[in-house]
Image: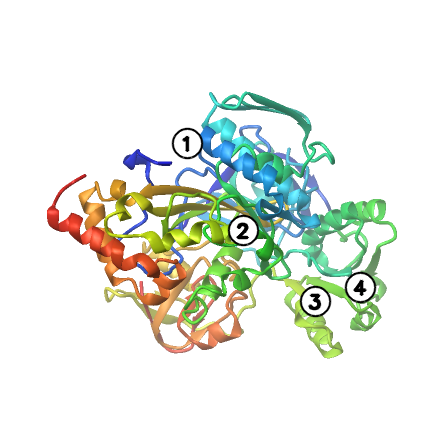
Amino acid sequence: MYKEKTIPVYVKAIEQENEFIRRFTLASVNEELLPKFSGGAHISTYIEHGELLVRQYSLTSNPDDTKHYQIAVRLSDTSRGGSRYWHEKMKVGDQLQISYPKNHFPLSFKAKHHVFYAAGIGITPFLSMMNELHSRGSSFELYYASKTEEACAFYDFLQEHYPNQYRFYFSNKRERINSSSLEEHPIGTHVYFCGPESFISDLTESAYQLGYPPSAVHTERFTPPQPKDMQPFNVQLKDGTLVEVARDQTLLEALLNKGIKAPYSCRVGRCGTCELQVVEGEIAHYDSFFSEDQKQSQSRILTCVSRSKSAMLVLDV
Amino acid sequence: MKWINNLESFPYPFKGSTYRYSNNSIPMKTPLCVEVTPDYIEEMQLKRTLLNHHAERCYQSLPHTITGQWEIVELVIDHLAAQYPDQFSVEKKGSKWTFNNKILEEKQEFTFGGESTFPEEPLAFISRHVQEDLILMMQRDGDLYLDAGQLCFPANWSLAFNLGMKFKCIHHPIPGFKEEGLDDRILQFLMRLEAGNPWERKNWSLMAGDRLDTSLETFDQWGKLRKQVTKENAGELVHIRVEVQKLFRLPRTNGILFTINTHLLSLENLVSNREWLKQFHDILSELPPHITDYKGISLYKNEVLKYLSEKLESGKVV
């Protein structure tokens, strides 16, 4: 079974970025250098707290500085334990495991110009991307929406490092990112959206309507798009075992709880590791991994996000 | 030239009694991108001669690969120094590195990441110290491209021809690769490869002769041996060629390092293991024409089968 290797690290520093966001500096327990990473990369963090809390955070530090990593964690209103632990329990000196850096949100190689649209904590992946473009001498802009100036993470950092490349939009000043700015980018521009689901889907739709090729539109969702109405369903395994998947549970979680060694890695429907064969039943795909053709073939499922339209799925496992 | 006499270290590639193309990759137990075998000195001499005299066919790169090339230098040197401390060492003082190859008694000082540190590119430098061929695939705009490589021992393909090509274009000539959907699945597998979690696989073919450097460009020199195979000379002339291939994600550039370590074993050595003889006979007899054609075995497959059958019948272990 595929199980990813991890790196033991400890929390070297904690800084309060603003009311809701804390920055954590992580360093290797063995004082070894950490792997370098590419712009847009993230890590998975593994925290043992009763259950194993696995969360993904963008790396916000300099990709070439491997003495430490930095992540920024926003205390989520609907925290399922991850961000709450980071904010309320994590202390300087605490140890945890992290994955090697991964990148599901890479910079385009062929783009002539890069424009980043961020809302709130959606700024985080863009920090390493801008660092990379800046050191390469490539052209980019940042459009960044936040509730207020005080709640705007990395406000000072951005002003200091990229003084001519950002535009802030503060909703308490009635400023809003308007999709009409998409009309003003030259041909060859690639756009990148990161923030709440509605922010991403509105901008994506506008970009497509304006005629952006899909390959020039890049999005990063911190949580996979969720079905509006989660329904429980059952799966049957090869040996006849029945597994119930509750309304608030993923298929992967249900399999793991049952002691089944199902493969997984990213848990957000991006990497494809958790793929299982489906023999019978209709799949509701929620991943961003399979192609449309693969989804329509109804023969494979990513258990970390996808569900069943029928009452029962029969899995080849 | 007999490249391998030690059967125990031969990466025997077969499982079961049939063979088909597949993604037979497995997670690596010991994450090493290169290995040093007893043939090290001999192979390095051959490789360096090829690199010096046939640079175009043995080394190609696109200009945007330099950062990825440095990642390969770092990975290879770290692995050599950690796994073979008596043969290799590295001293790092900031970006000032000193690499010591104690087998060849060569010491190289350089500035890591610095321009014009070596008379050649970083990938070309490090490839002169390892038996493996080193290929750099860059992942850009949702696809994989062969953007740089050092290739001295290809199994009948051309680096110069493939430079800059996409993964699927490179593998297009393999019969059934597209029709069976293997191209999509393996491309997806490669694109989801993660740093820290390397994979390896074995690939095999047969060849008439014992040349490691069977490039497409030199087919005229080695291809005609295929016509000279008889059941009498097959044991000595025909070799099984096994490539141990390793895949590492390079985290800084999000590229992939693909290393190929090529092993040759004569059939007479292979069949000295009775189980291997039986299994290989079964596999070769059953192998469908589209695979024997592509692997270049068709011309002499029958002679090899006659040789194997005689060995089986005689029950003799050579």
User: In this rendering, does residue B102 appear at all?
Assistant: yes
* Residue marked by disc 2: A55
Distance CA(mark 1)–CA(mark 4): 69 Å
Please determine if labels 2 and 3 lie on a single subunit.
yes
* Residue marked by disc 3: A216
Q: Position of residue A87 (x, y in %)?
A: 61, 45
- Numbered disc 3: secondary structure: helix
Q: Position of residue A61 (x, y in %)?
A: 69, 42
In contact (CB < 8 Å): disc 2 and disc 4:
no
**Residue placed farthest to the right in the image?**
A164
Residue B39: which disc?
Answer: 1
Residue A302: which disc?
Answer: none
Please determine if labels 3 and 1 lie on a single subunit.
no
Task: Please state, as top left, top right, bottom left or bottom right, where the C terminus of chain B lies in the image.
Answer: top left
Amino acid carrying label 4: it is Ser
Amino acid carrying label 1: it is Asp
User: In this rendering, does residue A313 appear at all?
Assistant: no
Distance CA(mark 2)–CA(mark 3): 28 Å
Q: What residue appears at the point 35 percent right and 56 percent down from the top-left corner?
A: B227
**Relative to B271, does residue B219 appear above or below in the rendering?**
below
Distance CA(mark 3)–CA(mark 4): 28 Å
**Relative to A276, does residue A63 appear above or below in the rendering?**
above
Q: What residue appears at the point 42 percent right and 47 percent down from the top-left corner?
A: B200
* Residue marked by disc 4: A171
